[in-house]
């Protein structure tokens, strides 16, 4: 029996189980199919891209809608949390707080597992403890935890970070750990996420490098980008076979992991107006299996007090990404340091030709 000969009620049942893109292909077959899929496509158009505005409480409203009808979460493909958005809903109704708290209690067991993936425990509050308070649901970060759990087809996540996202950062750390556990990996959220971008909310200082570490642990991620991200006093630790292992006297060892092999499938790193202690790249780069493109535009002391050492950055890349890197761009306005490599020319070849300066 062909699809066209099926009764309409059977076709409707099939459509209910289609993802939006296959539903679109189904609609293109004939006008009858288009009529059947019309509601499906309307929902896709409504929920495909979520961008909260300054004159509404989109995140709270959207999360409530999805909790009441989880199927709507399948339509969300892009979440764009711009700077001009509400981050607190002081007049959130008590029934909504209760709804969010009950939803959190259902999913929290998935994120309360024991893990030895990271070298040591981080400085963040316990996720279960922080989400157990009823008043926490007036904060955007807590609601975002619920939302990210319920949008399984999300492809793009963009966020302007603020100082009030501890709950979300704690959640992402647990997601990063969960993906390293074979028993939990298939249950983790963000299974389809391809691009993540984090930006700082102000004109001075920076957002945490922690975001990069946690998002890079999501297996589907291919591109991570940051604007005004920074780190300071990253200490000394593993920097490549020639350097051995050094003590790490700093407080950022909680970002290093115990894995013996790279865990990240990220292919592109884009850091714009960022400023890192160069040792931070000896945390990020060993995580990545096959980095292909690396762009680092140093933002200077207005972002972080760490000094920019272009040669140390190149050395970290040579140690950890020379087998795969095809495109490299380093720029730093304060000293005029600039390096650009043409595509498909690896660091290994460039260094062999003495075109990249070695560390002195």
Image: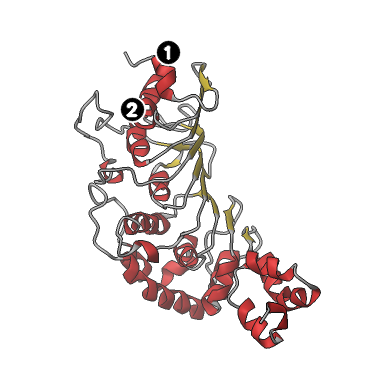
Which residue of the protein is positioned furthest toward the right in this rendering? Answer: 31
Q: Relative to 2, is 287 above or below?
A: above
**Image-based side of 238 in relation to 298, left or right:** left
**Secondary structure category for the residue under label 1:** loop
Does any portion of residue 186 appear in the rendered image? yes
- At label 2, counting other C-alpha atoms closer than 10 Å, the crowd grade (few under 14, some 14-19, many 20 or more) is many
Q: Relative to 280, is 155 above or below?
A: below
Residue 347: x, y in percent?
43, 24
Q: Nearer the viewer, mark 1 or mark 2?
A: 1
The residue closer to the viewer here, 162 or 183, is 183
Residue 131: x, y in percent?
37, 68
Question: In which quadrant of the rendered image does the N terminus lie?
Answer: bottom right
Q: Residue at left 64%, top 77%? A: 15
Q: Nearer the N terminus, badge 1 or badge 2?
A: 2
Instruction: Name the residue tied to disc 1.
Output: 353
Q: Relative to 321, is 315 above or below?
A: above
Instruction: Name the residue tied to disc 2.
Output: 319
The residue closer to the viewer here, 306 or 284, is 284
The residue closer to the viewer here, 64 or 315, is 315
The residue closer to the viewer here, 74 or 3, is 3
Q: Residue at left 24%, top 61%? A: 114
Which residue of the protein is positioned furthest toward the front in this rendering? Answer: 1
**Secondary structure category for the residue under label 2:** helix
Label 1, label 2: how many angstroms apart (C-alpha)?
Answer: 16 Å
Residue 213: x, y in percent?
38, 45
Does any portion of residue 93 appear in the rendered image? no
């Amino acid at each position: 029996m062909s699809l066209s000969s099926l009764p309409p009620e059977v076709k409707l049942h099939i459509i209910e189980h289609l993802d939006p893109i296959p539903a679109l292909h189904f609609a293109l077959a004939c006008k009858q199919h288009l009529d059947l899929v019309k509601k499906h496509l309307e929902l896709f158009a409504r929920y495909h891209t979520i961008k909260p505005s300054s004159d509404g409480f989109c995140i709270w409203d959207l999360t409530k809608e999805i909790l009441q009808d989880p199927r709507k979460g399948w339509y969300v493909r892009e979440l764009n949390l711009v700077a001009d958005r509400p981050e607190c809903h002081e007049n959130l109704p008590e029934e909504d707080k209760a709804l969010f708290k009950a939803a959190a209690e259902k999913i929290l067991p998935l994120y309360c597992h024991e893990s030895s993936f990271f070298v040591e425990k981080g400085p963040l509050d316990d996720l279960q403890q922080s989400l157990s308070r009823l008043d926490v649901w007036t904060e955007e970060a807590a609601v975002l935890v619920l939302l990210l759990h319920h949008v399984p087809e999300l492809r793009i996540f963009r966020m302007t970070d603020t100082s009030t996202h501890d709950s979300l950062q704690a959640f992402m750390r647990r997601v990063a750990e969960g993906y390293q556990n074979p028993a939990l990996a298939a249950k983790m959220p963000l299974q389809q996420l391809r691009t993540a971008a984090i930006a700082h909310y102000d004109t001075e200082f920076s957002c945490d490098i922690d975001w990069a570490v946690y998002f890079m642990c999501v297996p589907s991620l291919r591109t991570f980008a940051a604007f005004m991200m920074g780190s300071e006093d990253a200490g000394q630790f593993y920097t490549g076979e020639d350097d051995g292992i050094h003590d790490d006297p700093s407080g950022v060892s909680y970002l290093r992991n115990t894995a013996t092999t790279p865990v990240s499938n990220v292919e592109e790193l884009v850091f714009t107006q960022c400023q890192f202690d160069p040792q931070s790249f000896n945390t990020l780069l060993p995580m990545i299996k096959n980095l292909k493109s690396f762009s680092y535009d140093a933002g200077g002391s207005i972002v972080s007090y760490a000094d920019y050492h272009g040669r140390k950055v190149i050395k970290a890349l040579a140690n950890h990404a020379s087998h795969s890197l095809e495109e490299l761009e380093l720029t730093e306005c304060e000293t005029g340091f600039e390096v650009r490599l043409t595509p498909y020319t690896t660091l290994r070849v460039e260094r062999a030709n003495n075109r990249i300066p070695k560390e002195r």
